[in-house]
Image (cartoon, rainbow, N blue to C red):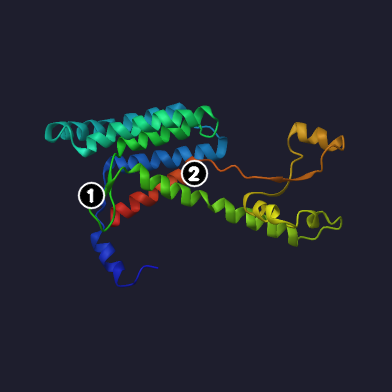
Amino acid sequence: MISSAIIPELILNFQPFAVPAEAVIAAVFFIAAALADLKDRNVPDRLWLVMTAAVLPFLAADLCADILTDPFSRKMFFRFLIPSAVLVFGNRIFRSGLFGGADLKAVIIFSFLFPEIRLPGSLMILPAIVPVLMMTSFFSSYWILFCLYMNVRYFLRRDPEGRNKTYFPKCLKDIFLLFVSYPGDIAEGERPKKDIEAGEMPKIQRVSPSVPFLLPFAAGVLSVFTVALFF
């Protein structure tokens, strides 16, 4: 909890016109990408093209300033090394099916636009993508609470057939499943519906929620920008 004595200091330190314009533009587009990913599970390429066109003038000015002052600075090193590393390793993850194309584009674009960041209260400089991915992991964990809520809700509801007792945890594995899945109706899909009608599988099965990466990623970007803004 933030102490009341610190709040006035935060307000005094808040300088909205010191916020880089490309940070505001990028935040808006990352939020738009997250909403598109959540709604349609697809982010159109034109969104990334428009975003690139919008930040290109600021990026060009920043690059020119870096080249004229110190072309071999740490910032320039991070700007080209981190996106290249993300492209190489991210492409492997993408080919394995664990990472989407839009997810990879978002990480590469962010790491190129924002190569470094100073940790609050210290002189340590890190690639900006590092704290963003850490916060992304933190925000991704919310689905664990969602799974627990859905399990408790399922166990406590009235069920004359007693199906809710079937999924009550009986061993260590069942306890683990409480955190990563919950009982759900799978009769929506065509194939599961045929299997249910044929008596090959029960109507209620454990399901796992699929969390779009760009949703917690956008939250991570906003949280890191907010901390950098106030501190």
Image x and y of residue 229, in percent: 29, 53
Residue placed under numbered mark 2 in the picture: 215
Residue 128 image-quadrant placement: top left
- Numbered circle sitting on residue 53: none
| Disc 2 element | helix
74 relative to 134 in the view: left or right: left
Dot 1 falls on a residue whose secondary structure is helix
Q: Position of residue 28 (x, y in %)?
A: 39, 42
Q: Amino acid at mark 2?
A: Leu
Q: Residues within 10 Å of mark 2 (few under 14, many from 20)?
A: many
- Using the image, determine if residue 20 lies above or below residue 41: below
Viewport quadrant of the N terminus: bottom left
Mark 1 packing: few (<14 Cα in 10 Å), some, or many (20+)?
few
Q: Tell me how far mark 1 sits from mark 2, CA to CA.
A: 26 Å
Give the answer, above or below, for where 63 lies relative to 148: above
Q: Is residue 133 left or right of residue 209?
A: left
Which residue appears farthest toward the left when viewing the image? 69
Q: What is the x, y in percent for residue 92? A: 47, 28
Identify residue type, mark 1. Ala
Quarter of the image for residue 76 reads: top left
Tell me what residue is drawn at x 58 percent, y 53 percent: 144
| Quadrant in the rendering for residue 81 | top left
Coordinates of residue 203 in the picture (x, y in percent): 80, 43
Front one among 67 and 11: 67
Query: Which numbered circle lies on residue 18?
Result: 1
Would residue 60 appear left or right of 44 to someone viewing this image? left
Q: Which residue is most to the front?
A: 172
